[in-house]
Amino acid sequence: MANSEYEYVKREFELDSHLPPSNWIVVRIDGCHFHRFSKIHTFEKPNDERALRLMNACATSMLEKFPDIVFAYGVSDEYSFVFREETEFYQRRESKILSLCVSYFTSVYVMKWKDFFPNKELKEPPYFDGRVVCYPNLKTIRDYLAWRQVDCHINNQYNTCFWSLVKSGKTEKEAQQALKGTFSKDKNELLSQQFQINYDDEPAIFRKGSCVYRDKVETMVKTDRCGNPIKRTRLVITNANVDIIGPEFSLIHSFDKPNDEAALRLMNASASLMMESFPDIVFGYGFSNEYSFVFQDKTELYQRQESLILSSCTSRFTLFYMMKWKDFFPNKDLVEPPHFEAELLCYPKQKILCDYLSSRQAECHTTNQYNTCFWMLVKSGKSENEAREILKGTLSKDKNELLFQQFHLNYNNEPAVFRKGSCTYRQKVEESADAEGRENTTRERWDVIVAHVDMGTEFWRKHPYILRKLDLLA
């Protein structure tokens, strides 16, 4: 069409949408009308393992065909393909990427059908729809994949119950009604009591879905003159049915639950060093894996440039945390580097600032009370899902009663560092100083201290000097 009078139709109407750079690209493919397709081809319910393995074979072919796909996750008739962040596949043109992925997946599905259903003819052509989504960072990608796996669990648990009820003689409407309003705990009990099925013993491919990725594998390429094997590492496309909801830092390092006192003291030590490093920090409050630092209102740290204050504080806190690790965990190595996210907030008045700090302490109490109940239930033999269901909708009073009646634990007697969090601030200390030819004299200095107290009106009345520099008493 070059240099023709008709070229305008391409120039003016064919607009290519280029996906933004430095973003992870996810192509999610879904089977169209697969409820009908699976019924026509008499797929087993609630799961047909052959159909799932066919989907996995298609995903494997996708990774073989498109090297820029680094990971894929699939469940039922759905597959998500993650392209590497810096991919330039088809100049990141959305329409090209989407159409190629859906088209190739569909053709492979048809070609491989007989490998998994040798005695079944394709009575109706399968087809898939798809969408492209961009995610800006690794955390968001992990959250996306975790979301899909959570969805896999929820749907599969429901479908396992539903089809067990139908196979026992109930109609589909009756099964839907029986499951209406049920929680995860109820479904597990239904499967166990009515059908002697332990849901956790169901095949992992059903409960967790399938991950397809390249893994390093050692293979023998030849032997040396003495007959010893010479091995090389190569990347092999692997299919696994595993948890992709990754373990938290606290889990990796085996922190005590619901509270690890050594971990909390490490956070407090890091906060104390922050106050020593930044004189303009007048107060800090922390609980769990969180710390808030209050700067005096007239601070000129980094000329009040948000990015510099934020990055410097985050970097320094991370550094102190790593430097002090061995002081609190002498027998534990850092297996994974700690990292912290942060935000910077401005409050115009002292009252609003104090309300903010009170809100964090209220959050500390609410979270810790829940976690104390949750982990006591888990340690007593309940599954994590069962513990969540028991605590769902409970009030503070209910939790206190549960702890007292079931575990003889008075929540108000728990250590204050767990219930109230930690306040870090400077306090005036007097020390003696010897002077030549004079009697002992005293001099004052300011030490950083950590206290576990209520941050109510009485606290600020007793410590007016903490916020005095803020000049917000108007």
Image (cartoon, grey):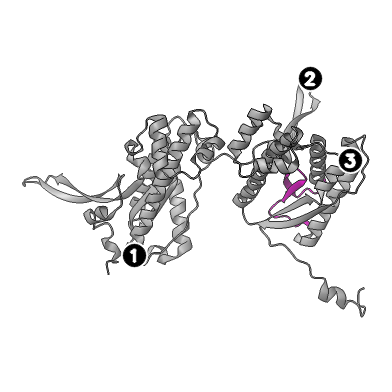
| Closer mark to the observer between disc 2 and disc 3 | 3
In-image side of 100 versus 24 (left or right): right
Kindly indicate whether the residue at mark 3 contacts the one at mark 1 (C-beta within 8 angstroms). Answer: no
Where are the magenta residues, as a range? 65-89
| Closer mark to the observer between disc 2 and disc 1 | 1
List x then y, in percent, for residue 31: 80, 49
Query: What kind of residue is marked 3?
Result: Trp
Q: Which residue is mark 3?
A: 113
Q: Residue 227, labelled with which disc?
A: 2
Q: Please name the residue shown 53% across and 31% down the image.
A: 382
Disc 2 packing (10 Å; few <14; some 14–19; many ≥20): few
Disc 1 packing (10 Å; few <14; some 14–19; many ≥20): many
Kindly indicate whether the residue at mark 1 contacts the one at mark 2 (C-beta within 8 angstroms). Answer: no
Q: First in sequence: mark 1 or mark 3?
A: 3
Q: Compute the Cα span from label 2 to label 3.
A: 43 Å
List x then y, in percent, for residue 329: 43, 33
Query: What kind of residue is marked 1?
Result: Asp
The quadrant in which residue 165 appears is: top right
The quadrant in which residue 187 appears is: top right
List x then y, in percent, for residue 229: 76, 23
Q: SS of the residue at dot 1?
A: loop
Q: SS of the residue at dot 2?
A: loop
Whether residue 287 is visible, yes or no, is no
Whether 315 is among the magenta residues is no
